[in-house]
Each structure stands twice: as structure tokens, then as C-alpha cells.
Amino acid sequence: MKLIYSDASPYARTARMVVRELGLGSKVQEVAYHPFDNPKELIDANPLCKVPCLIDDNGMAIFDSQIMGEYLDDYATIDKPLFADVNNSWQLKTLYSLTRGLLDTAVALQQDKMRGEGQSEFWQERFYSALDRGLAYLQKHLASFPKQFEILSINTVALVSYLKFRHPEYTNLEGFTKLNMWFDEQQSRPSVSQTAPK
């Protein structure tokens, strides 16, 4: 299989962490592209020209980090799949959805910042407010996280890391003490350290 990714993409990072947590490193070749370069291999596989994009051994393209994670989870056939807890709990499924929404918000904020003088104060205020509320909710429910490092944990690591990487001006993040402590505790995991954004 081939996984097309970009170092800076938090969605691609979740896919790369999934590969490592499932022990599929020897079965998945990782290829880095910048989507803005419109690489032909990526466009041919994913008409949206977005990463991550997984091309399986039969040439089928799978895109969207959640769908890709579920596919790899099924492919690995391990005793405790990474989506097992989320799929068996409406609360955890909702928290997982929240992390996806917060990732979307953080990426949209970065895209708006890239507009330079065309940035929208209205949208930036909404993005920051959504991050404030969403992170507070996530921190409040940290005790509900499964003990296993699974897909909810993977998304949360990718989210906090992306905020630190792309949005250092978002100093409110520092106020979420418990969330930051949890995040720091995950840094020694190989799947986390090996996929840190550059």
C-alpha cells in the first residue's frame, strides 16, 4: 500500500499514527507531497487533491482520514481495533466527532491566515471562540478517554500538536492545563514522536 501525505497536515498525521499503532509500517509506503503542487499521482487517486490518500494493493484509492483509519483498522485485524471503543460508545463517538471538527476549525484558521491582508476578523474570531469552547469541552471529558491509545487519542494529539505548530499566537491553549499534561504524556510514543510536524 502507499500513503500519500504532507508533513504539515494534521489529517495525514492521524493516518500515519494509525499505521504505526497498527504495526503496518512494513506494509505501507509513505510518500510526501505538497498538495498545492498538484502532483499527478495524488490527483489521479483523489480528485480533491487532498492528503492523506491511501492507495491499496489493488490500486483502490481511499481518502478522508476517518475512512482511511477504519480501513486500516479492519485490514490489521488486531484484537482491539483503534475504533473499537469509539464505535461502542455514543459519548466517545461524539468526542471523536468534536476532535474532527476542531481539526477542521484549526485548518480553516490557518487557511484564513494565509490570505494575508485578506484575512477576515469575523471568521478568525469565530474560529478562536470555537477552539476555546471545544478544547474546554474536550478537557472536561478527558477522564472518559479509553486507557488504550486509540483513534480518539490519536486525533487529540494531532489537534493539540497542530495548534502549537501552526497557531503559536493562540495562547489560550496554554490555559488548558490538564489537556496539555495529557498531551505531554503521549510524546514518548513512537507513533507520536515519529510523525511530529515539520
Image (cartoon, grey):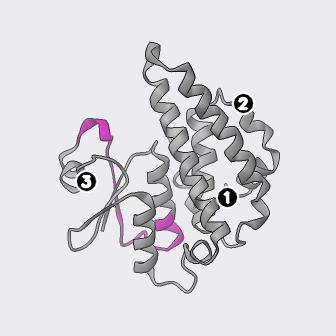
Residue 196 visible in the snapshot: no
Tell me the residue at 58%/46% (across/down).
Answer: 102
For disc 3, the marked residue is 46
Q: Amino acid at mark 3?
A: Asn
The earlier-in-sequence mark between 1 and 2 is 2
For disc 1, the marked residue is 188
Image height of 173 relative to 30, above or below: above
Quarter of the image where one finds residue 95: bottom right
The earlier-in-sequence mark between 3 and 2 is 3
| Circle 3 SS class | loop
Residue 28, horizontal then vertical, whole percent: 36, 67
Residue closest to the eye, 157 or 141? 141
For disc 2, the marked residue is 171
Tell me the residue at 55%/86% (across/down).
Answer: 79
Residues at circles 3 and 1 in contact by the CB criterion of under 8 Å = no
| Circle 2 SS class | helix
The earlier-in-sequence mark between 3 and 1 is 3
Image height of 194 relative to 169, above or below: below
Judged left or right of residue 159, residue 138 is right
Q: Report crowding for label 3: few under 14, some 14 to 19, many 20 or more residues within 10 A (C-alpha).
A: some
Region in magenta: 18-38
Residue 107, horizontal then vertical, whole percent: 49, 39
